[in-house]
Image (spheres, helix red, strand yellow):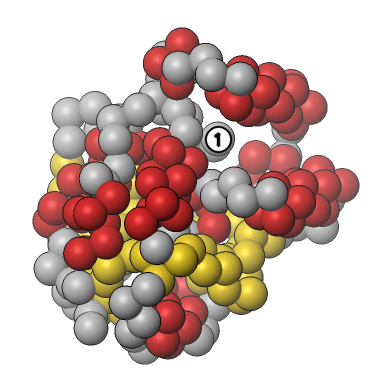
Amino acid sequence: MEISVIIPTYNEEQTIGKTLDALSRLVNVSELVIVDGGSTDRTIEIAETHDKIKNTQIVSLSRASRGLQLHAGAEHATGEILWFVYADARPVQGSGRQIKKYLNNEEISGGHFEVYFKGGSFWARLMTRICSQIRSSGLVYGESAIFTSREKYEAAGGFRDLPKFEDVDFAHRLQKIGRFVYVKMPVEISDRRFRSGYWWRFTKWSVRQTLYWIGIPPRFLSREYLPSR
């Protein structure tokens, strides 16, 4: 079973190189599909010149929508296993081996990893702790690098083109069709979102979570795709 890694990008020049370096060190990654939503910085240039993963596709879309990009990546990927990794996320060695081990079990619909925000700041430590609490309640976000088989991806209906919470929506549907596992290995997330103005971003994030879980449709919660979400 070959693993295809799918990365949605939009103006990710500050992080994409380090993410590609981290993925290139994983021996079980067979293919990389980068789906760009119209970047205006050097994202595509960096991806095109990164030659450490030979089997790499770059797919360009006319607009940035993370759900749309992730679904397009799944359609272009050739592997039997689909692993959705964000552009500021860095999986560690051994992650691919764990994915293959779990997906050999037909009862398992997919899984995700432990989220660890780098940097050591108060906000990074706080969000790492919050993500741990959220995981224990059954909520799954895309930062945790969701993986599944192609068969289960199609059975669950794939990612939807939602302005927000496309990751939570997809993980919830995967959980309905089989056992969804938690792999206690870290995916390191860049600390870029904690460098300035984080209190305001954290407040908006908290309000959006609350509104979503009381039933407000995602289209009313955001009008744009923000890579620093």
Q: Residue furthest top?
A: 220
Q: Nearer the viewer, residue 211 or 36?
A: 211
Residue 166, quarter of picture? top left
Classify residue 95 as left or right of residue 73.
Answer: right
Query: Residue 222 in the image: x percent, y percent?
Result: 47, 17
Q: Nearer the viewer, residue 100 or 6?
A: 100
Above or below for 197 versus 13? above
**Residue sitting at x 45%, y 21%:** 218
Q: Nearer the viewer, residue 211 or 70?
A: 211
Report the number of discs: 1
**Residue sitting at x 18%, y 72%:** 79
Query: Residue 85 in the image: x percent, y percent?
Result: 42, 58
Residue 1 seen by the camera: yes
Q: Which residue is under mark 1?
A: 229
Above or below for 67 versus 210? below
Q: Nearer the viewer, residue 114 or 92?
A: 114
Query: Residue 161 in the image: x percent, y percent?
Result: 28, 30
Residue 54, quarter of picture? bottom left
Classify residue 67 as left or right of residue 142.
Answer: left
**Residue sitting at x 51%, y 84%:** 93
Badge 1 local density, few (<14 within 10 Å), some, or many (20+)?
Answer: few
- Quarter in which the C terminus is drawn: top right
**Residue sitting at x 57%, y 73%:** 183
Q: Residue furthest right?
A: 122
Query: Residue 158 in the image: x percent, y percent?
Result: 26, 47
Q: Secondary structure at mark 1?
A: loop
Q: Amino acid at mark 1?
A: Arg
- Quarter in which the N terminus is drawn: bottom left
